[in-house]
Amino acid sequence: MQTSPDPAPAGAPATANPTCVVNCAVYGPDGKRDIRLDDISDVLAVDDGSFVWIGLFEPDQDVLAVLQGEFALHDLAIEDAGKAHQRPKIEAYGDSLFIVANTAQAIDERIAYGETHIFLGARYLVTVRHGASLSYAPARQRVEREAELLAMGAPAALYAVLDAIVDNYLPIVDDFKATLNALEQDIISEQFHRGIVIRLYQLKRELTYMRVAVTPLQDVLSQLVRSSSPLIPSDAKLYIRDVLDHSVRINETIDAIRDILGTALGVNQALVTLTQGETVKKLGAWAALLAAPTLITSWYGMNFHDMPELDDRYAYPLLIGGVGIVMIVLYRMFKKARWL
Amino acid sequence: MQTSPDPAPAGAPATANPTCVVNCAVYGPDGKRDIRLDDISDVLAVDDGSFVWIGLFEPDQDVLAVLQGEFALHDLAIEDAGKAHQRPKIEAYGDSLFIVANTAQAIDERIAYGETHIFLGARYLVTVRHGASLSYAPARQRVEREAELLAMGAPAALYAVLDAIVDNYLPIVDDFKATLNALEQDIISEQFHRGIVIRLYQLKRELTYMRVAVTPLQDVLSQLVRSSSPLIPSDAKLYIRDVLDHSVRINETIDAIRDILGTALGVNQALVTLTQGETVKKLGAWAALLAAPTLITSWYGMNFHDMPELDDRYAYPLLIGGVGIVMIVLYRMFKKARWL
Amino acid sequence: MQTSPDPAPAGAPATANPTCVVNCAVYGPDGKRDIRLDDISDVLAVDDGSFVWIGLFEPDQDVLAVLQGEFALHDLAIEDAGKAHQRPKIEAYGDSLFIVANTAQAIDERIAYGETHIFLGARYLVTVRHGASLSYAPARQRVEREAELLAMGAPAALYAVLDAIVDNYLPIVDDFKATLNALEQDIISEQFHRGIVIRLYQLKRELTYMRVAVTPLQDVLSQLVRSSSPLIPSDAKLYIRDVLDHSVRINETIDAIRDILGTALGVNQALVTLTQGETVKKLGAWAALLAAPTLITSWYGMNFHDMPELDDRYAYPLLIGGVGIVMIVLYRMFKKARWL
Amino acid sequence: MQTSPDPAPAGAPATANPTCVVNCAVYGPDGKRDIRLDDISDVLAVDDGSFVWIGLFEPDQDVLAVLQGEFALHDLAIEDAGKAHQRPKIEAYGDSLFIVANTAQAIDERIAYGETHIFLGARYLVTVRHGASLSYAPARQRVEREAELLAMGAPAALYAVLDAIVDNYLPIVDDFKATLNALEQDIISEQFHRGIVIRLYQLKRELTYMRVAVTPLQDVLSQLVRSSSPLIPSDAKLYIRDVLDHSVRINETIDAIRDILGTALGVNQALVTLTQGETVKKLGAWAALLAAPTLITSWYGMNFHDMPELDDRYAYPLLIGGVGIVMIVLYRMFKKARWL
Amino acid sequence: MQTSPDPAPAGAPATANPTCVVNCAVYGPDGKRDIRLDDISDVLAVDDGSFVWIGLFEPDQDVLAVLQGEFALHDLAIEDAGKAHQRPKIEAYGDSLFIVANTAQAIDERIAYGETHIFLGARYLVTVRHGASLSYAPARQRVEREAELLAMGAPAALYAVLDAIVDNYLPIVDDFKATLNALEQDIISEQFHRGIVIRLYQLKRELTYMRVAVTPLQDVLSQLVRSSSPLIPSDAKLYIRDVLDHSVRINETIDAIRDILGTALGVNQALVTLTQGETVKKLGAWAALLAAPTLITSWYGMNFHDMPELDDRYAYPLLIGGVGIVMIVLYRMFKKARWL
């Protein structure tokens, strides 16, 4: 399952950390070192420029209690972190920041939403994932890899996580755009069927819900960029502004697609109406092609005694010819008027 | 009745308080103690960290007059509290805050709106319920239960009441969302009937009215969070910000549902139009299947003397076969063109 | 006529004031006393806590000139007051405020708009009514009646007038809401006719124009509440904020009704389309019920010599039975498919 | 031609000014005096409370160069003034203001847009008209006539010109409103034809373009009112605020009409759909009135040997009566069901 | 290819610059002089009022690395400049500004978007083009030509580039407007066909995407105008404000066209519906013209023994006349009712 925590690396040192602890390591000038949850405060006691990065997946209360003890976190934040369904927000509790961000993940053509709760301190970052989201292992590897980020400490880790969260929306939005383009082709190429309309509707619905997720995420990023907290130094803000730009672009794209979708629905309706008008004309033309000779045949089915033409020898062949001519003329007329 | 005041607990001490007084108690470090309205000023005379919490349900003027005397409330606020149909607002009168909040309650599939007027002083909270709303007994029990809240005093009681008010909207909005999902299924599964459209309309109307109720409530909460009043200490603001977040989320969900509803109405219209086009085609096809043989039979009903085929012995069986072939060919043509 | 000035009370002292002067009195601690326009400056010369309240209805230039002399009003304000069709606004001229407010009045199912121009000074209030508006006599009586307002002086008179103006919109908006509810019932109960659509349109149009009137009125009230003018003391602002709240509520209700009206129009269209689809099906079913036996009868109208069934003795009764069966079967089929 | 410069008054002193100079005069305490362009700096050298007012119509570069020399204008402003298609704006260049305003004029049922560029200095005002606009002669005459304005100097001239520009939009907007009312009547009175829809469209389009013109004009006026430039004294601002109010009212009216137009289009569509439904019903009813007797006559056209009723003597008159009854019954049924 | 870098002028001095370097020159009081990338820092070492202007087209990392060395650019900016798909923004890195702007270019009826990244320093401007955009050679020539701009230095070069970028949108928007006008004519002149609707849709889609490009460009320009950076002197701001005005006008035009397009789609739908109603009426009229005589002929095809009129000698000619009269009367009725 994509949403499960990353499996512990084979042959990992047997830290006694519970399984909901996906990652627990200290990142310093001399690289990354896995530690036990209980050792955090010991590690932080020495200020050697290192910081601790914990990654949790749907942790239980016990683990959160241990963390609260090690990092001296606020009651309210711990309470929040223990339950999902928070609105994206940023909250300053004492000398730490508590950030809630929405995450999205496309699973089998549906979008599942999750949340990541983040505690940022001067020398630590704790991420708590709830529900659908990708692992932050790539974000951690990026920080390990890029010396500049590693040197910036915990804020760089925050940046890497936020960047991963926002970038996760991009393929979904691109997918929406591709679907819209495909539907556009269907609409234009006269391939009307119920499926197109239903798909347009579902697309619009998904985008509406995604917008509810992304807009407050953008607010959170914008608050971080404007934040006066000493936990977010100005060089970190340069990076976070980049993430903000991505979220703005995602939002703008969502709005543009939503806008175009609305027009596409209207255009589809217009084309269906046009096509129906053509159907009605075609029906009318065929009805006339049948009704006109029916009138003629009905005429000569009348029982008047004195209908001289009935007795004429060439009457019947003439009638056949006449009906034929009527039908050809009508057909041409309708063809010319584009009813057929 | 859900909207009636909570019945007095059986065997409650016979405080002489009128029936519109749902609750009247002092909350202190040593727990909750029921008191008489007239004793309030005596209790408040001793500053022992306790606060008084009064709960009223549609009180008469006499009770309000007593309260005004005990808490030294402003004339205008008392006047407001005596009558319903106020717009949610927050007003500072002297050293007390007067807050009006909208309440909603689903009663038999309809949403009834009520109001709660709140007086907040340094050491008291008075709630005055008008119209539909749930009792605040759970909110009081929560404050009694959570020591942290109890220690915060009157602002915690305010938080508990506001939290109960906003949380009351959540099941209603969730219900709306469930209804929308059910209607979506109906629309998609080609189950058109008037009921769907009417239900979509009613849903939109209810959401529009609910929005008129929730938006100013959100404004009130946002003003409380930004308030510089000493009555709202900053630790209480952390809690109230949480309530604000919930109201924002409710508002966003209402907007999203309204948006999707609008699209659903359009999509329903589009599908109905598509289906009608198919009906017209089907009618046209059947009309042709009847009109074509009618032309043939009408043809051989003509009374020309010289219609040699009429006299042929196999003419009639041949005609039967011919008509059969015409009908089969037409049927296949229409089937292929998806008119049938 | 509702819009005419209040008739002078019978047996009133024969003040020589022109008829466009509806009211001219000094309000002091010892009650109200009618005075002549020319005596105003003499009255104001003695600062005894009293204030002068003038009510005019479409005054001529001479009366305005007298007022300008008595109160030392600004040329531009006097010029404005003499002509209608001003936009609601608030303007500070020297040591007086000039306020323009829109008034509305339902006359015979139509809404007529008027204007009231108000001059507020430290010790006077002049109201100039133009066009449709109710008399401010009730507002004056209220100030006379409520000691608290009377003590506040001219700002209280301003409050009373503004409150009367805004409250005048309420019954109109309530009427709109009632009309919408009635139309809703008509739409839902399948009572389509042109009248419903036209009424929805007219309602939307009236609301759109009313919004143009109320929105700037709300702006004016909001400016008064935020005003730093010494003419509006802070206790008067508490009252005016109440009027502002009413105007906001009116605006919100107008927006909600407009919103619902838009949906109602769409829903009406959707139901009309649905009903038409049913009409087409019904027509198709009846056409088939007639066309099928017509084909059969046409069949046996053919003149083939060898149509053995024609000669059979029971052929005709059998045919009658056959056609009957065909029609019953078709009828049941259509009934089952809900085409009939 | 309305857009041509005003012709020089007959018998005017032969100032050697080029024809693009519509007006060039000095306005002082002792009235207006026409001068030559080259004399401007001489006139301004004496500070006697007078100001110079130049009116140009699509001037050539030479005239602009002379002006630049006389008033020491900024290069960029002169460059702007020489070409049309500027966006309304206000720009401070050194000690002068450069203002661009959109003008509109209804010519033969179409709205032509023009621009007026204005240079305002301490003692001069230069207006440069491009494209469609009325002459500012009435504005000049107003300043000459009203002593109060004349005393205010150049800012009063600016006010008079801006007032003329904005007032020019009023009759156009009133025209739009009248057209909307006429179309309303057509829509309601069942007079559907293509012309109505096309006229609604054109109205909406014109209003959309007009809005693009008026909105920035309102911005410019609002900037002037808030301007801290010494060129706009506070008493002039009182006047300009009045112009701003007019522009706001025009904008609000445009928005209201646009809004109502949108509804009118929807209502027209709804009524057309309703009417078409009635047409279909009428067609269906008439089809039944023809098809039912056709079935009967076809029935008795069958050639069965044993159709006893054919031989009955009263059969034919009975049939005539029967068919008549069938048609009368059907007619009444359809009449009752309002299909006819 | 329009998007390719400008070819090196024939006979240009063989500077060893790579091909992605479109331009590399120093602009000073004594004109323009081409230099090698590696000589930049030498040139800048002497502060003689000159500035360096580099133009790159999709440069590789090596060239960017050289530039970073010569101008001491920030890592993040260089990283950004190396990759496309940035959102328009303005970022201050140390003592340089980094600006990203969207460019648009119509290629074969489609709009291709590109980006230009700009580094502005006190004495240099670097432009990096990605994707579709026109060459900035005309911008460079303009700066060379206009002494005033040349004297302003690097900010003037920035202005010239931004002006070229924004002006590039103008012909595209004008094209859109022309297309809208052409479609308008088609819609009004009853030339309905699928192509019109599809073109309206495509126009709306292109405008929606263009808006996503232009809106942030306008934000960037507005930030430049309000910027407090010493790199943008106030006289340069006058120029940039002009570019801002153009971008605002483009945005307003896009919005107006989008608005009108929406109305055009609705009007097209309304006219199509009206036309279909006319088609149905025409079909009904023709059906009646055929069905009425069919009923008559069917009548006289009945086999009653006693149908006296059948034996009448003049019956048949009378019938012919009667049918003729019926058809003429019906035809006139339908003509009068405008069904034909």
Image (cartoon, coloured by chain):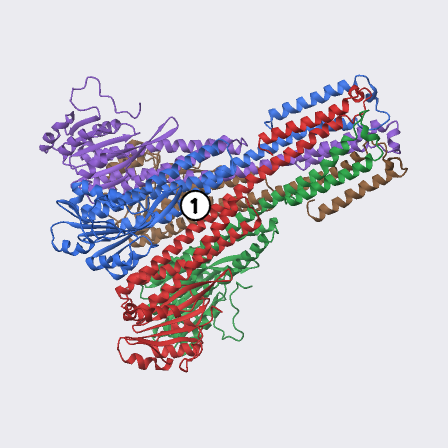
Chain colours: A red, B green, C brown, D purple, E blue
User: Residue C167 in the image: x percent, y percent?
Assistant: 42, 47
Which quarter shows the N terminus of chain D?
top left
Depth check, front residue: C221 or A24: A24
Q: Is residue D254 visible?
A: yes
Which quarter shows the C terminus of chain D?
top right
Depth check, front residue: A121 or C310: C310
Q: Is residue E240 visible?
A: no
Residue at the far right in the pictured view? C313
Depth check, front residue: A177 or E72: E72
**In which quarter of the view is residue C80 placed?**
top left
Please, which chain is the residue tagged with disc 1 on?
E
**Residue hosting label 1:** E205
User: Residue A12 in the image: x percent, y percent?
Assistant: 41, 80
User: Which residue does the image show at 49% across and 47% down from the upper left?
Assistant: A184
> Mark 1: which amino acid?
Arg
User: Residue E102 in the image: x percent, y percent?
Assistant: 32, 49
- Tally the numbered discs: 1
| Residue C237, above or below A221 | above
